[in-house]
Image (spheres, helix red, strand yellow):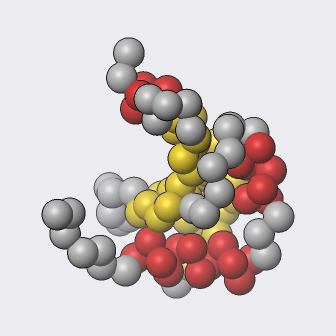
Amino acid sequence: MQPQDLAIEEQLDILIVEGQRCQMWIRSEPDPDGTWHNAALFRRDGKLSPAGTLVTGLEWHLPPGFALERARQLQPAERLELFQRALRPRPPLA
């Protein structure tokens, strides 16, 4: 079983961004050494929404459930900042 098969996604919230609903999820995924890595995922709702998911990494390394609880402590402005960070272009992988 590949490590990506162990990823767990938990829905956190619904944001309204630019007049459109956007689901916010927290992904927890272990690496081969057993360290958990967390990311915030954003999926827009609606017929005209892009099919892709926006993703940004989180600073903490918590297992599922604990990561969701930590994310629940984020203020609305912090959640919006994570969405905006996920929109930013990333440098190419080396």
Residue 92 position, x and y percent, is: 19, 69
Which residue occupies 68% across, 37% down?
64
Kindly identify the residue that appears in the image at 33 percent across and 57 percent down.
52
Residue 16 coordinates in the image, percent (x, y): 62, 75
Q: Position of residue 86 (x, y in %)?
A: 44, 71
Looking at the picture, tell me which residue is in the foreground, 40 or 14: 40
Q: Residue at x 66, y 62 (%)?
A: 14
In front of the other: 71 or 34: 34
The image shows residue 52, relative to residue 4, as above or below, that is: below
Q: Nearer the viewer, residue 85 or 58?
A: 58
94 sits left or right of 42 in the view:
left
Check the picture and name the quadrant holding the N terminus: top left
Closer to us: 69 or 45: 69
Up/down of 72 relative to 19, above or below: above
Q: Position of residue 81 (x, y in %)?
A: 59, 81
Tell me if residue 7 can be seen.
no
Q: Where is residue 34, by image quadrant?
A: top right
Left or right, residue 71 beside residue 92: right
Q: Is residue 84 in sight in this rendering?
A: yes
